[in-house]
């Protein structure tokens, strides 16, 4: 147990924070866009939804695309949301749930299960403005330094713009969200260069993808009517290797920073 506990900082940097929560380097993305006009037939969507499945009939797609572009381009506003993450390849599988605050500095509180060749680790991770706190298998909390500019939720808007520029077939229409609040989201799919989705993969998966000379990743996005990310799934495969990373947001609310763990 002591060896596993001593190695948790590396696990978190290489597998959890980097690979699942969308990167520990680069500048922090701006908060998601402010509310724009809702897609036809829905209120402001919220919740996570699987990208696969049949889209909802949506009428005039030209108007839908205009609303989507306006939402993505609108001034950004901070928010909080529930967060679900999962990352998997041949060597590791991490999944977790929690809460994230997206503002000038992103903060979060997560419960994570990390499965590698060394076995299963249950980890609680709280990321404040100044530090990362980890608790492994119910042991005492440990404090780790936080890399300046680290992000927990990738800025999806450049991906949306690239997919839209690739052609009209990238936009698949409106899709129902099977969340508690329901609603609809804009659905986009397509291949993007690894460099354009790198912050959604994290350093560990990026390294493994580079080792297998994979240049592009299948990208599947759901964006709500406020321009906020609802779900991002990236699949990067080639040379006998396959990595999948997904992130979903739900239950959006006012911005509120995550505090230091109360039982520290």
Image (cartoon, grey):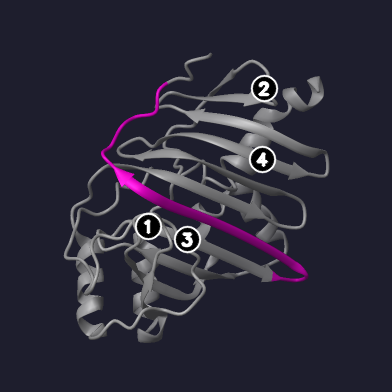
Kindly identify which residue carries mark 3: 232
C-alpha distance separating marks 4 and 1: 23 Å
Q: Residue at x 56, y 40 (%)?
A: 17
Q: Quadrant of residue 217?
A: bottom right
Q: Earlier in the sequence, mark 2 or mark 3?
A: 2
Residue at 19% x, 56% y: name it. Answer: 35
Q: Could you say which disc has been placed on residue 146 in the image?
A: none
Say few, some or many: other residues with alpha carbon within 10 Å of mark 3 (under 14 / 14 to 19 / 20 or more): many
Mark 2 or mark 1, earlier in chain: 2
Q: Is residue 33 left or right of residue 193?
A: left
Q: CA distance from mark 2 to mark 1?
A: 32 Å
The quadrant of the picture occupied by the N terminus is: top right
Q: Residues within 10 Å of mark 1 (few under 14, many from 20)?
A: many
Magenta residue span: 238-259
Q: Is residue 233 above or below residue 130?
A: below
Give me the C-alpha separation between circle 3 and circle 4: 20 Å
The residue that label 1 is drawn on is 229
SS category of the residue bearing label 2 = loop
Residue named by callout 4: 113
Q: Are marks 1 and 3 in contact (CB under 8 Å)?
A: yes
In the rendered image, residue 144, in percent from the top left (x then y), is placed at 56, 22
What residue is drawn where x is 58% and y is 57%?
Answer: 245
Pick whichever of labels 4 and 1 is earlier in the sequence: 4
* C-alpha span from label 2 to label 3: 30 Å
């Amino acid at each position: 147990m002591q060896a596993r506990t001593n190695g948790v900082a590396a696990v978190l940097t290489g597998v959890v924070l980097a690979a699942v929560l969308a990167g520990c380097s680069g500048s922090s993305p701006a908060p998601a866009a402010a509310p724009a006009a809702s897609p036809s037939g829905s209120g402001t969507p919220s919740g996570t939804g699987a990208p696969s499945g049949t889209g909802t009939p949506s009428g005039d797609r030209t108007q839908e695309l205009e609303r989507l572009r306006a939402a993505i381009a609108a001034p950004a506003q901070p928010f909080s949301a529930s967060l679900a993450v999962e990352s998997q390849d041949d060597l590791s599988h991490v999944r977790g749930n929690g809460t994230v605050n997206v503002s000038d500095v992103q903060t979060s509180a997560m419960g994570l299960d990390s499965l590698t060749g060394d076995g299963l680790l249950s980890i609680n991770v709280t990321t404040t403005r100044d530090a990362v706190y980890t608790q492994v298998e119910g042991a005492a909390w440990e404090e780790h330094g936080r890399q300046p500019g680290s992000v927990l939720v990738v800025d999806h808007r450049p991906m949306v713009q690239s997919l839209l520029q690739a052609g009209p077939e990238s936009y698949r229409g409106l899709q129902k969200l099977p969340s508690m609040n329901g609603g609809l989201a804009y659905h986009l799919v397509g291949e993007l260069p690894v460099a354009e989705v790198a912050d959604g993969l994290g350093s560990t998966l990026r390294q493994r993808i580079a080792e297998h000379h994979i240049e592009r990743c299948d990208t599947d996005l759901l964006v709500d009517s406020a321009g906020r990310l609802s779900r991002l799934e990236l699949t990067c495969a080639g040379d006998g290797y396959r990595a999948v990373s997904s992130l979903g947001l739900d239950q959006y609310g006012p911005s509120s920073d995550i505090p230091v763990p109360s039982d520290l």
